[in-house]
Image (cartoon, rainbow, N blue to C red):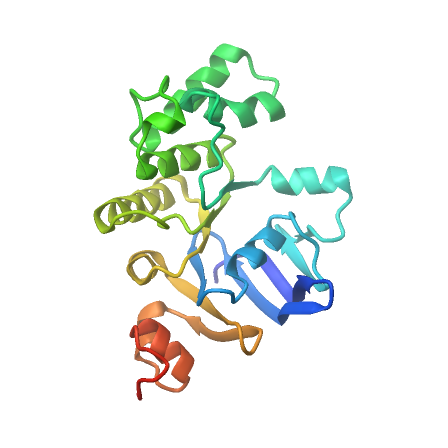
Amino acid sequence: MAKTIIQVKNLSIGFDDITILENVSFEVYQGEIFIILGGSGCGKSTLLNHMIGLQSPQQGDIFIHEKSIVTADEQQRQEILSSIGVAFQGGALLGSMTLLENVMLPLQEHTDLPEKAIEWIASQKLRLVDLDGYERHMPSQLSGGMQKRAALARAIAMDPDILFLDEPSAGLDPVTAAYLDELILQLSKMLGVTFVIVTHELQSIFSLAGRAIMLDKTTKGIIAEGNPIDMKKDRSNPAVWRFFNRMAISETV
């Protein structure tokens, strides 16, 4: 049986008096590519922000490697965060730094390695995402897809065993998005990393996911869970059927 690496228990999240998700529970298994999907405004990215400790829930808990990121003190939180990498939707590269300097940054902040070693590691991470030769380029000199790959290189700089990606294909043309999906699959096999990916891009969902959960804005919870191919065939929930089959609300099923 696959080992549980992340456990979300009875989680409710929101802002002030507004609840976005209520009493949500699920598990992520070691080594899998796990997708969080759903329509706009359902709370996908907000859930990811809670899972990486950027926001605190209204109630419930999140365990990473059996340690609560919700109740952890600062030292415990840093230990938990050292095992994860994050690539945000916009890439979040620092525009005043070269690609190499961007990837070196987490190593400089969180290790005592010599500068030459840090530079070598960073260059190898860029090579893993097919950006060798672009070390001295500035983010503004690159295409959107290349910036996404650079952000991915920075996310794996510390050799995390969990990678969180927020809408990695957003804003990319279909060919570039497919290339990025293939790169994620390669990294999953090569590094054995667990991926948690937020996306609503159907092609990426079918290409990447072994398992997924679908969030729903109306019910404020999970309305489907499992293999996306099976979820597409399931007519039991009209909202799930419409999403996977690209049907407008006015259409009958």
Q: Is residue 225 above or below residue 46?
A: below
Question: Which part of the image, by quadrant, shows the C terminus?
Answer: bottom left
Where residue 203 sits, quadrant-wise, is bottom left
Q: Residue at x 35, y 40 (%)?
A: 190
What residue occupies the far left of the structure in this picture? Answer: 175
Pick out the residue farthest to the front. Answer: 250
Residue lying at 29% horizontally and 57% vertically, measured from the top left:
207
Task: Report whether 109 appears left or right of 228.
Answer: right
Which residue is at 43% across, 59% downward?
Answer: 35
Residue 133 is situated, as x and y percent measured from the top left of the image, at 29, 20
Specify whether 32 is left or right of 71: left
Point out residue 240 in the picture as x, y percentages from the top left corner. 40, 77
Answer left or right for 92 relative to 149.
right
Q: Is residue 5 visible?
A: no
Determine whether, in the image, residue 187 is placed left or right of residue 52. left
Q: How many marks?
A: 0
| Residue 33 versus residue 90 in the image, above or below | below
Task: Answer above or below: position of 118 versus 148.
Answer: above
Q: Is residue 229 visible?
A: yes
Q: Is residue 155 above or below residue 233?
A: above
Name the one closer to the observer, 208 or 140. 140
Q: Nearer the viewer, residue 252 or 36?
A: 252
- Seen from the viewer's position, the closer of residues 14 and 196 is 14
| Residue drawn 55% across the image and 63% down it | 43
Q: Position of residue 40 (x, y in %)?
A: 46, 65
Q: Nearer the viewer, residue 184 or 87?
A: 87
Q: Quadrant of residue 187?
A: top left
User: Where is residue 205 shown, x and y percent of the image?
Assistant: 34, 60
